[in-house]
Image (spheres, rainbow, N blue to C red):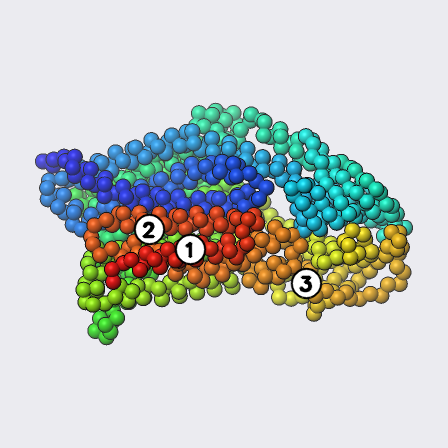
Amino acid sequence: MPRFSWKISSYIIRSILPYLGFAWLILSVILFVQQASRYSDIFFNNIIPATLIWQLTLALVPNVIILTCPMAVLVGVIIGLSKMQGDSELVVIRAAGIGNLQITLPIIILGIVLSFLAFFINLKGIPLAAQIVRKIAIQTALLKLASPIEPGVFNTEIQGLTIYVKNGDFEKGTWQNIFIYQEDQKNQQVRLITSTNGRIDSGSEDTELVLERASVSSFSLENPKQKLVSEQVKNLRFRIQTKRGELLNKLSKTEETPEELGLNELAQYALSKSGKEKTEAEILWLRRIVLSITPLIFAILGTALVLRFNRGGRGWGIFLALISLISYYLIALFGEQLARTGVISVFFSGLIPILIAAMAITWFFLSQRLNLQNSFGNIFYSFNYKWPVNFTTKNRPSLFSSLSTGMLDFDIISNLIKYFCLTLSFITALYLIFTAFELWKFAGTISGGFGLLLKYLFFLIPFIYIQISPSALMIATLATYIIKSRQNEVVTWTSAGQSIYRLLFPCFILMMLIGLLNWGIQTNFLPQTNKIQDSFRAQLRNKGLLASNTGRHWVATGNRIYSFELDDKVNDRGSQPQKVKNLSIYQLDDSNNKLISLTRVEFATWESEKILLAGRLEKNLWKNDFPEIVENNNETELLESYNPFKQIPSKPNHLDDHELAEFVQTSEAESEKKVYLVALEKRKTTLFLPLIITLFTVPFALTLSRKGNIMTIAGAVGVWLIFMGVSNIFEQYGLSGYLEPRMAIWSPLVIFGLIGAFLLSRIRT
């Protein structure tokens, strides 16, 4: 008769909780960074108040922890019990008369508690967070409208106007050297306005543009040879329409989106809708319910997995958790898609992952009792026997043991690579799963959406790798050296008269190689894959339609302003010379406040420090502030030291190092220069980041005693979190101009590198 023991139950919970807590913390931080990247224009905008940034930060937390809670439960249970299995503690517990039911019961209670927490967050936290995010987005848009012009940047968001300001003072709200292009499609008229000084006066609805000493020239779009009209205006004021009133209405409206509704309100909302809106609301309601009970399901599933597969080790536990997570969420995703296509009901689609998990749990618990010799488990054992990677923590013979005294080096490197790959695979799978959940509502409604989503996820993998590689290296370093410390390998090594630094030598070499690999990927490979995956993402959100590359682009270089359209037949960032069409060149005087000439040409190509002009060409000159048409102009080229057609503002992660450096040198906008310079410096740190993380991680992992393992892990994770937080804060200071970009990016690495070196020097060697 099995007997129940409170001490054993509490010991099992205590063995699981540290791994659950660390997994929850690490996964939450990593997924928070992923979620926050969607709002980078808010987090790194110097006109947004710190209060709004903190509100957005707190609003993202519920969505993150509700996703990571089930994962942390599964990881914590599997790794905790696997450790007990590897240390033969479960054998001792069973020898004391404690059966599987008594082992599972406290874990079930833990799962129920966390499920109640998840249910409360889904009930109150998620809707409240969605409301806060919506209001912050609208308030941010209002703040941008209050100061819509940024020096050095072309503003095309105001309907009918393109505004460029050479210089400006944000604090005083004034501009200097202003260029405005106003196009009236109805009357086929264009007005070119240049001015010495100006400002914007924002009201509740409209915004008034105020210019001093303005020069205004008008011409016809239909007949370019028609005489231009030019006039000088001492003070020019005209109203421009913005969306301020519309945004204020959105901010004050009471109607909420489905994401902002609680469970009861969401159910009522679903009843009031029909068609796709009803289906999506029902799927969202059922997803919240399923996520609420998933911690309990994963707690039982993790226990069943460990008790069924009688193996030990954290590596084996991570592998089991990865397979379980991928299977569960893919089944849930498949069920939602069946509901969207009408194959099954929404209610049954939510039951599919629960029913399959229940069947798996039942099989795992009963297979040994029923002596299923031909079960999947035996087949898996046979496969695992042939698998070249041993997931246990037991010592194994080294291939080089008879050839070299450096067998420990190869053992350390192999363990570092093993845990790095396991962690990397685990977190990458989570990224892909939740990205797929986010985009499936778009992919599931278009023809070929599934293939398009797979392509997007494939090209997203390099970006994910660069993002999570440092965190995976930290975890791999901790796992490798803590296990060796617990197995007294470190004590044996030092007792043999060897220095502890010799034990770290292979780790440092490997980190330098991984840093070199990451830098190569970041520099040569990632820009192209980022372009492709962003294109696929836009296509998914645009219902399968390719993003149009039409429209005019504006670039300023010195006292020239270029306006052009890209030639679709030429790769806009290829190695071939850049070709554009419908080019307009506005030549300003040395003070940048008066127009000297306007050249319009059908085609143009930059090549060898000059712009080659081709096709129909028209030119106008301004003399004494009055324009005249230049007849029989045979101009075929224009000197330009660099290619202005490649200076279209792009995302920094779409550019290679050479292009980033070129943008830093040529950009007229200080804010753009900071963004590109921060990105360039951050890319350089990729080479040294693995080594820096190792420096402040190994001192916590290399304890020469068997006590305090949890505290050493907590210390290492704590320093890692502080490093990430400080790095992000310094990066924001660099983007906002409070710190010079190089100092902002390199300071955290230098500081924590010195901290790591100091901690390392304190270790007994």
First in residue order: circle 3 vs circle 1: 3
Give 328 or 174, whichever is nearer the viewer.
174
The quarter of the picture where the N terminus appears is top left
Given the image, on which type of amino acid does mark 2 rest?
Ala
Name the residue at 50% across, 46% down.
37
Label 1 packing within 10 angstroms: few (<14), some (14-19), many (20+):
few
Label placed on residue 508: none
Give 364 or 45, whichever is nearer the viewer.
45
Task: Pinpoint residue 152: horizontal percent, then vertical percent.
Answer: 67, 51
Given the image, on which type of amino acid does mark 1 rest?
Ile
In terms of secondary structure, where does tag 2 sit?
helix
- Is residue 41 at all visible to an observer of this figure? no
Give 343 or 352, whichever is nearer the viewer.
352
The quarter of the picture where the C terminus appears is bottom left
Give 6 or 301, whichever is nearer the viewer.
6
Report the side of 404 relative to 459 (left or right): left
Given the image, on which type of amino acid does mark 3 rest?
Asn
First in residue order: circle 2 vs circle 3: 3
Task: Pinpoint residue 129: horizontal percent, then vertical percent.
Answer: 47, 33
- Is residue 114 at all visible to an observer of this figure? yes
Label placed on residue 751: 1
Label placed on residue 716: 2
What residue did someone put label 3 on? 643
Q: CA distance from mark 2 to mark 3?
A: 48 Å
Q: Are marks 3 and 1 in contact (CB under 8 Å)?
A: no
Q: CA distance from mark 2 to mark 1?
A: 16 Å
Name the residue at 42% across, 49% down.
724
Name the residue at 51% across, 62% down.
523
